Image (cartoon, rainbow, N blue to C red):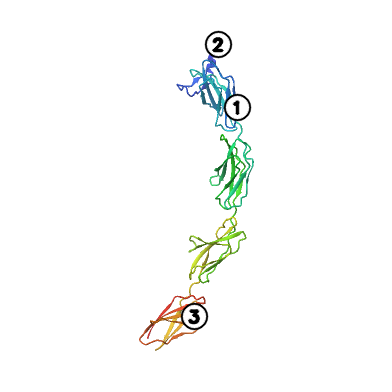
Amino acid sequence: MKNLTKSILLAGSIILAITGCTNNVPLKSNPNVAQVKELRTLSDRNAIALEWDVVNKPDIAGYYIQRSEDAKKYKTIKKIESKYVAHYTDTDLKPNKTYYYKISTFTNKGVPSFAKFKRAKTLPTIDPVPFIANANLKAKGMIKIIFRPHPNERVEGYEVQKFNDQNSKWEDLATLEPRLRAEYIDKGLIDGKVYRYRIIAYTFDGLKSAPSQVVVAQTLQKPQVIQNPQATTDKVRKIILNWPKIKSASEYKIYYASNENGSYDLLATTKSNIYTDAVGKDGFVRFYKITSVNKYGIESLPSQSVMGSTLAVPAEPIVSIEKNTNSVKFIISSPDKRAVKYLIKKDDGKKIINIHDVHSPYTDNKVLKKHTYSYKIYSIDKNGLRSKASKVEVSF
């Protein structure tokens, strides 16, 4: 009967996959090998300590420790090659999770005993940061997050995370240390955009808290866009710009380009809603866009473009002549009606210049037979702008 009982126990023994054996062949547990009588556990948030009474038998060489997460598949996590050791700490575990352990002795020949079973659960993770808020920082492109330092003195620092709308994931933004540091300023942000943040505390031993509440914050809005800017087209060698005042604006920026769809460069910054661009050229064309800037330095989107130009020179005069034996009469007219007088230059070697009234023809009586004279006639407007010359050549 004794032998039969022994055979049944052997047939029903648990097969342990023992690592570290010389022949790497799993051995059958032997009921005759002294067992660990009691296995005790002590839990932390990311570790479980195992304790047992030393099995001080002559043939005992040490202990095998196995672990499972489902009480079905066990893995040998430690081979202790001393029967006098009675403690082992299993680390890098997940908080608030149940683990299953088996401990077996083994002989000098590597034969294991029946295993002692124990279930243990790690402690829950540390609480999240107790308070977090948007500090409503009034600054361009910045959001300031404040929070209450974690009360747990094991906390070493914090991870600041920001939600990425493009990939719908939380991403690490910054690390803050030590525990009492409780603010973060995010810079270089887009004006008027909404951002989401959260904080995760971590301990000296690498344990992380649950995420804090999510803070939703928005950067300051851009000022109002300037509507319907105006630019002059009839001023001499200058362009005057004006636009409606923006209540929140502390200053305005004026940009210019040589064509409407070109690249606009900064021309000037002004606190007034009127600006004079003294270009110093006749018939000069520029395109402008204007922005408003508030006291926080936030700039609005640009206005629609507006074209301005300086006054062009008058049109060349239309000239007809009536030639007599010893004189020539000039009948002159202004096609754009801008001429208030004409400048007539006669080139006879002396460059005689005559200013003539616009309302009556001009007659040159100082001519000689068998001579050819060249004339240049210019229109002069009320601003003193002179047209290109109309050229006339007369032979006698």
- Label 3 neighbourhood size at 10 Å, few (<14), some (14-19), many (20+)? many
- Tell me whether the residue at label 1 lies in contact with that at label 2, contact meaning CB atoms closer than 8 angstroms: no
Question: Which residue is the site of mark 1?
Answer: 42
Dot 1 lies on which element? strand
Estimate the spatial distance between the alpha carbons at disc 2 and disc 3, rounded to whole Å: 142 Å
Q: Which quadrant of the rendered structure holds the N terminus?
A: top right
Residue 135 in the image: state x and y as whole percent: 62, 48
Q: Which is more toward the observer, 48 or 14?
A: 48
User: Of callouts 1 and 2, which one flags the residue occurring earlier in the amino acid sequence?
Assistant: 2
Residue 48 in the image: state x and y as whole percent: 58, 28
Number of numbered callouts drawn: 3
Quadrant in which residue 351 is drawn: bottom left
Residue type indicated by callout 2: Lys
**363 relative to 156, above or below:** below
Question: Which residue is the site of mark 2?
Answer: 2
Residue 224 in the image: state x and y as whole percent: 59, 58
Question: Can you name the residue that lies furthest to the bottom here?
Answer: 325
- Label 1 neighbourhood size at 10 Å, few (<14), some (14-19), many (20+)? some
Question: Which residue is the site of mark 3?
Answer: 341
User: Of circles 2 and 3, which is in front?
Assistant: 3
